[in-house]
Image: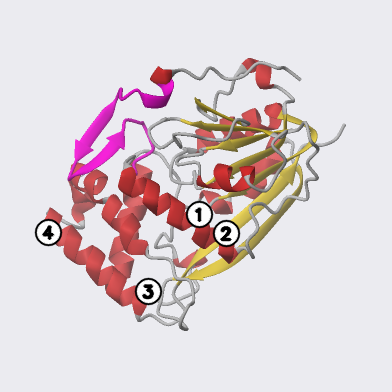
Amino acid sequence: MSDSKPEETALSRTGNGGIQHHNARTYASSESYILPSDEAERQRLDHQHGLFKRNFENRLFMAPVALKAADRVLDSGTGAGSWLLDFAGEVPDTVAIYGIDISPRLFPANPPANVHLSTQSVTQLPADWSATFALVNQRHLVGGLTATAWKAALAEIYRVLVPGGWYDLRPMSLMNCDSTHMDYQQGPATFKMLKIVDAVFRSVGALPDAVYHLRGWLEEAGFVNVDTQMRRLPLCHGAPGQDTFNSYVVHAALKTPVMKAGGFGLVSSDEEYDQLALATQEELWSTENAAVQNFMIYAQKPAV
């Protein structure tokens, strides 16, 4: 196992190259990742982390990994570091935790000493990371990778895992309008909004339905013991105190890329998009059984 660490410089942690501002939101330039990269997005990610953790019985990962004191763990697509910081509080500080993302803008400012942050792409990890990590965690990159990039990422994750190591990922369904995977009746506003969500991600090559392909891709990459867990997270009004996923904040964050693409023939102005996002929220709130499908998938690199 290499003792080298990814380069951590002030520039990589605080640089602002490729930053764009639209509709009072900040975006980091990327060929495929289209959500914002600003304080509002940090707050959304922190809230979402807690919501999804509770949805899986407060478990941070599902893989049956038994970490040892000197193990290393990689958090791919760490974003604001919500999972990484939570995980750091649950393991000994001798466990080295690496967090990577294509943009450093949301990195936590003062992480624990055993946390190492760097700007990396999961499709091209450092050469000296081969057979380094006992666990690789990945969250919510379903909207940021093409099919080709997914396969490259899985090959890289396989390479950097130790033999017998585990890959644990949560690729939330993006609720596309394909009725094949829907288990509730969509209203007209919801159907239209989901067509827009599907279109905007596909316009940059990302696959909203990647979750349904991952088992095959994982097995093709050489992983074994692949397992999928799914929990439904309500989008509608439920019992008092019940967690619900507020899809409006995601739809609102997507307005800039949707309108820059011309609205895909479905909306023609910012005002029309805003009205549709609100109508979708109201419709989902009153739609019986409306829920997002929240997945956890884990797989193992063979021990030999």
Label pair 2/1, CB-CB below 8 angstroms? yes
Identify the secondary structure beneath mark 2.
Answer: helix
- Does residue 230 sit above or below 14 in this rendering? below
Question: Label 3: how many residues lie within 10 Å, few (<14), some (14-19) or many (20+)?
Answer: some
Residue at image coords 74%, 25%: 131
Identify the secondary structure beneath mark 1.
Answer: helix
Identify the secondary structure beneath mark 3.
Answer: loop
Which is closer to the viewer, label 2 or label 3? 2
Cα gap from disc 2 to disc 4, whole angstroms: 35 Å
User: What number is the disc on residue 236?
Assistant: none
**What amino acid type is highlighted by mark number 3?**
Gln
The residue identified by callout 4 is 271
- Does residue 170 sit above or below 231 in this rendering? above
User: Between disc 3 and disc 4, whose residue precedes?
Assistant: 3
**What amino acid type is highlighted by mark number 2?**
Lys
Cα gap from disc 1 to disc 3, whole angstroms: 26 Å
- Does residue 227 sit above or below 149 in this rendering? below
Q: Nearer the viewer, residue 290 or 66?
A: 66
Label pair 2/4, CB-CB below 8 angstroms? no
The residue identified by callout 1 is 49
Quadrant of the frame with the C terminus = top right
Which is closer to the viewer, label 4 or label 1? 1
Which is closer to the viewer, label 1 or label 3? 1
Count the labels in the image.
4
Q: On the rendered structure, is 241 left or right of 24?
A: right
- Percent x, y of residue 187: 32, 75
Identify the secondary structure beneath mark 4.
Answer: helix
The residue identified by callout 2 is 53
The residue identified by callout 3 is 186
Question: Which region of the structure is painted magenta?
Answer: 12-35
Residue at image coords 58%, 48%: 86
